[in-house]
Amino acid sequence: MIEKIVIITLIIAIAIAFLCIKVIFRRNGSFSSQHIHDSEAMRERGIHCVMDQDREMRQRSRLAVNEKSAK
């Protein structure tokens, strides 16, 4: 039982170390943002966060969202 706990702890420690390599060994290292609005490729394609798309639709017309959901 203890052997399994040690092995699992070691695997988790190695995984965390691999995740932190960029942060630890680079001078200004940091994790890149995972948000859609921070991705250049997504912005070029016109893809936004669902919250932003909902806000845009509600600003255009309050009935636009309701008409689509009624069909």
Image (cartoon, rainbow, N blue to C red):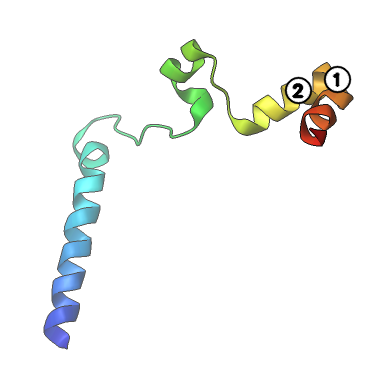
Residue identifier under label 1: 61
The image quadrant that residue 40 belongs to is top left
Residue at image coords 43%, 32%: 33
Q: Nearer the viewer, residue 66 or 13?
A: 66
Q: Position of residue 41 (x, y in %)?
A: 42, 16
Q: Decide: marks 2, 1 in contact (CB < 8 A)? A: yes
Q: Residues within 10 Å of mark 2 (few under 14, many from 20)?
A: few
The image quadrant that residue 53 belongs to is top right
Determine which of the numbered discs, if any, sits on residue 21 in the image: none
Residue 71 appears left or right of 8: right
SS category of the residue bearing label 2:
helix
Cα distance in 3D space between marks 2 and 1: 7 Å
Q: Nearer the viewer, residue 53 or 3?
A: 53
* Residue at the outermost bottom position: 1
Q: Is residue 41 above or below residue 30?
A: above
Residue identifier under label 2: 57
Q: Residues within 10 Å of mark 1 (few under 14, many from 20)?
A: few
- How many numbered circles are shown? 2
Residue 46 appears left or right of 1: right
Give the amino acid type for the residue marked by disc 2 in the picture: Met
The image quadrant that residue 7 belongs to is bottom left
Give the amino acid type for the residue marked by disc 1 in the picture: Ser
Q: Is residue 54 above or below residue 7?
A: above
Task: Please identify the quadrant where the C terminus is shown.
Answer: top right
